[in-house]
Amino acid sequence: MSVFLTLSRYKVKDTYATRQMLEHAISTMPAKGFTLHELRNLMITCEGRPRPDVFQKVRMHFAAAGLDRTAINTIYSHVLNPMIATRSYMNIEPIELWLDPKALRRGLVIPVEPDSMPGTFLVQDSGMVPVQTQVAIVNPETRRLCHTGEYGEIWVVSEACVQSFYNSKDSIDVERFQGKIADGDMTLYVRTGDLGFLHTVSRPIGPGQTLVEMQILFVLGGIGDTIEVNGLQHFPIDIESGIERCHRNIVPSGRFASLLSLRYLNPG
């Protein structure tokens, strides 16, 4: 409550929060006694794939306090770069895509209509790549750029990137900080270890609602978390989401779904 009273009293325009902070606030206090009309950029840090339910919870809970839905912005934050992509001051709501689940398991990104097939996956964007940041989607094994319609490892070039770990001589660290694209130039990328893809969309921006084409980054999950079964890639968050939808008594984002997904992937 002290945090939100401070934001209201001093008419703070930009602030930062984690998903856990906001979920705690939503569960423990009403959005009363303060206003958030002046808040223009609530940055929610996300180290992996954004959960669409987080935006909805924050929007609905703080609507009574005057928080504009376009002020709720996801930030793709990584241990090697605090802000790889952002939706701040774009004045648009999250961009959502429904993906073909069978194609996704084969490494392909095919947007579909949500009711066109069973088990479609909903993904929410992680924001637009800033002007001074360069992102490449690379096959982590061949080190070649992925084709349009494929997802791969997110490689980043930015002044905000960590350059090295202090006194580390580990060869893995060298690979992480000196990623080179095969058949590319000599640019050195930082390898995030996260899988994702770039997607081009058009949205009305500004007072005149001019249609602007922009390239948006979607983060799917970490390579280390992805599980291969019979040659197909599975993201734990998708398995958990499927389990949550199979029965009304399973609480969304609960620990029960996580335990069931582990059981599914490791039946022994």
Image (tube, helix red, strand yellow):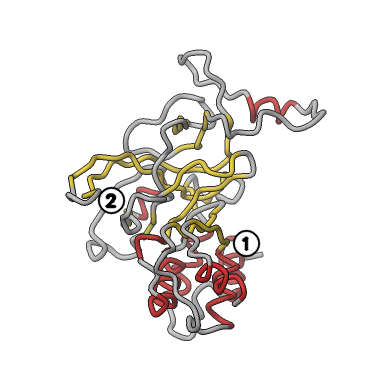
**Residue 249 coordinates in the image, percent (x, y):** 48, 86
Percent of width and height locating residue 153: 50, 37
Q: Secondary structure at mark 2?
A: loop
The residue that disc 2 covers is 111
Q: Amino acid at mark 2?
A: Pro
Q: First in sequence: mark 2 or mark 1?
A: 2
The image shows residue 78 at horizontal and vertical percentages of 59, 45
Picture quadrant where residue 98 is located: bottom left
Give, as a three-letter code, the residue at label 1. Answer: Asn
Question: Measured from the top left, where is residue 95 in percent x and y?
Answer: 32, 54
Q: Which residue is at a point 31% across and 55% down the rendered structure image?
A: 92
Q: Nearer the viewer, residue 18 or 53?
A: 18
Q: Residue furthest front?
A: 10
The 10 Å Cα crowd at callout 1, few under 14, some 14 to 19, many 20 or more, is few
Residue 266 image label: 1
3D distance between C-alphas at marks 2 and 1? 30 Å
Report the quarter where the N terminus lies.
Answer: bottom right
| Image mark count | 2
Examine the image and state in which quarter residue 18 appears: bottom right
Write the residue at 53% across / 78% down.
26
